[in-house]
Image (cartoon, helix red, strand yellow):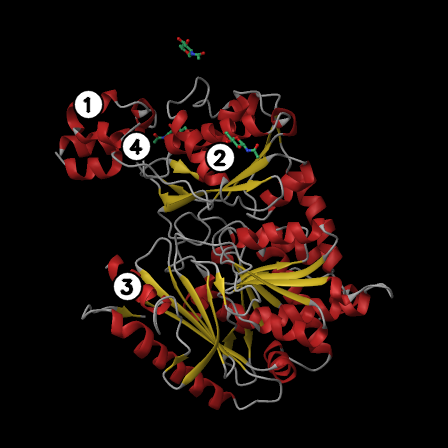
Amino acid sequence: FRPVFGCVVSSVLLWLPGLTGVLQNQKTKEQIESLLQDGKHQELRERLCCRLSFGTAGLRSAMGAGFCYINDLTVIQSTQGIYKYLERNFSDFKQRGFVVGYDTRGQVTSNCSSKKLAKLTAAVLLAKDVLVYFFSTYVPTPFVPYAVQQLGAVAGVMITASHNRKEDNGYKVYWENGAQITSPHDKEIIKCIEECVEPWNGSWNENRVDTSPLRQDPLRRICDSYMQDLTKICYHRELNVQSSLKFVHTSFHGVGHDYVQLAFKAFGFQPPIPVPEQKDPDPDFSTVKCPNPEEGESVLELSLRLAEKEGAKVVVATDPDADRLAVAEQQDNGCWKVFTGNELAALFGWWMFSCWKENCSPDADVRNVYMLATTVSSKILRAIALKEGFHFEETLPGFKWIGSRVKNLLDNGKEVLFAFEESIGFMCGTSVLDKDGVSAAVVIAEMATYLQGQGLTLAQKLLDIYETYGYHISKTSYFLCYDPPTIKRIFERLRNFEGPQCYPKCCGAYNILHVRDVTTGYDSSQLNHKSVLPVSRNSQMLTFTFQNGCVATLRTSGTEPKIKYYAEMCALPGLSDRGVLEEELQKLIEALIENFLEPAKNGLTWRSA
Ligand SMILES: *[C@@H]1O[C@H](CO)[C@@H](O)[C@H](O)[C@H]1NC(C)=O
Ligand SMILES: *[C@@H]1O[C@H](CO)[C@@H](O)[C@H](O)[C@H]1NC(C)=O
Ligand SMILES: CC(=O)N[C@H]1CO[C@H](CO)[C@@H](O)[C@@H]1O
């Protein structure tokens, strides 16, 4: 399919290669037919003269008819491309096999569901004699990368749109190393997809998973082994068993309930109290305005009320595909504190290191130990690492970078305890090389239980961590800017601030110590002035390290018309006047906007959030 062909929509419509596919699904067929009848040529063009772009995150779009939507056909086409790519790259692909998992999403109007799309994914591969590990029921996203590694499969796919709105779905691809694919696999796969857009014989046979001898159900084996592996990061089972602390868990209408229950059992806990209205799968996410626990108190309403009724002090919330975790804790004044991703990371980082230290063998070397975070996440782990003697590393934003780097470190004999990204994604231990809300939920439960024994709450311990390692206060926001030349101008101006190829040395009254430009690969803090991070030419990202301890990153968003900023005040241990630090951070952000963003916007207005 080439976009040009589709542009004389009505007459050639039926000749488009692959269009027979659109028509295989009665519901998406009806959507196209009704657009045709109503003469909605513009919308037809938008739906048919494009192709869903396949990237390192796989596919992500609304479900519905058309080549830039997620539907039976686009999933078949993508899987055919992946088949082609894997067949060329792995001589033992068919024997080693491929993992397919799915969440609980679905949409009546297009008769698409994650399970159906997963069955079609499996059908494409089974028809080509590939061994397929197809889960017999929905699973958390982290189960797929875990299964890929455990089963020695070549790759895997999870059909999920995580915490996105209910209209969306997605197709997330994991490589044999158990991490999400990175470039250039995505580019190669795109080429392969374009080579085989016409569905093959057999690709439509979604019922093949029920009959093919090449299909295996890995559910039992993977679930048992996952729960067994979880206990590697359980350090205080004896406390958990006796604990009277109650927990409420919400699975946000997604996959999490059964798995979080099992994880608590594996740690020796009483089962957490589920939020009844949200415990079972519901593709409409009926009780939340958006299925993202990151939104804080407003979406946690039902959990918090239940916790108050039950006398549970801690609420854990897994997002719909259970790869991320939000946590709230009731404070002495009765109010709830919903922790940010960065705050939770401070707790996890402290906890995973303390547990390691207490349990490591006498000849263990702390210099062999690593923690990781993405460039836009809090630097609290850096502060802990500095004081405790282990390594801290940054990766580009996105867990695919963390996963691949962790695998690399493990292959080189290093020990990785914890990694995170600020958007409540946590990796505790290394059984799964991706964010995992199930393990994070049970680890925080153990932490809260242990702390209760010490007479501390999570919030009190957080302050304690800040006292010990230095306060870390961060603020993230963005400007909407619909004019790409303006965005380009802003960043180019910063690259040529004090003359050609000369980055700013200060921002208003604030002195800049170091600049890192991931777009060009420059980093003034390195001896050779080369950034250790992979160069990322297609996006803008500049990080300034200020003399006062603040670190600020300006970056564009890959998919939205935004300039985002992430600023953090990293104070030295002992500087504990939070108010003063907050004020300083606020003033610095204002200086950043006034000096770095405003002057290059040419009168354009933008909306700040
Ligand atoms: C939805 O798709 C399934 C096959 O996956 C089919 O059996 C069913 O009849 C379809 N439902 C509607 C309403 O078209
Ligand atoms: C696919 O099936 C059709 C009809 O059954 C047949 O004519 C065609 O040759 C088949 N193609 C391949 C590649 O097997
Ligand atoms: C690592 C590897 O073998 N990559 C190859 C995979 O297959 C594509 C063709 O589809 C080649 O271009 C890659 O070099």
Which residue matches tag 1? 12
Quadrant location of the N terminus in the rendered image: top left
The answer for how far apart the CA atoms under marks 3 and 2 are is 44 Å
Foreground residue among 61 and 295:
61
Q: Which of marks 3 and 4 is nearer the N terminus?
A: 4
Asked whether the beta carbons under mark 4 and mark 1 sit within 8 Å of each other, the answer is: no
Asked whether the beta carbons under mark 1 and mark 3 sit within 8 Å of each other, the answer is: no
For disc 2, does the CB lie below 8 Å from ligand 1?
Answer: no
Q: Name which residue type carries label 1.
A: Val
Q: Which of marks 2 and 4 is nearer the N terminus?
A: 4
Residue 400 sits above or below residue 365 on the image: above
Measuring from the top left, give residue 526's x and y in whole percent. 56, 67
Residue 296 sits above or below residue 36 on the image: below
Which residue matches tag 3? 489
Viewer-nearest of labels 2 and 1? 1
In the picture as drawn, the residue positioned furthest to the right comes out as 362
> Residue, x 67% and y 81% (percent of image)?
456
Which residue matches tag 2? 118
Judging from the image, what secondary structure is the residue with disc 2 in?
Answer: helix
Which residue matches tag 4? 28
Q: Name which residue type carries label 2.
A: Ala
Judging from the image, what secondary structure is the residue with disc 3 in?
Answer: helix
Q: Name which residue type carries label 4.
A: Thr
Residue 154 sits above or below residue 551 on the image: above
Asked whether the beta carbons under mark 3 and mark 4 sit within 8 Å of each other, the answer is: no
Viewer-nearest of labels 3 and 2? 3
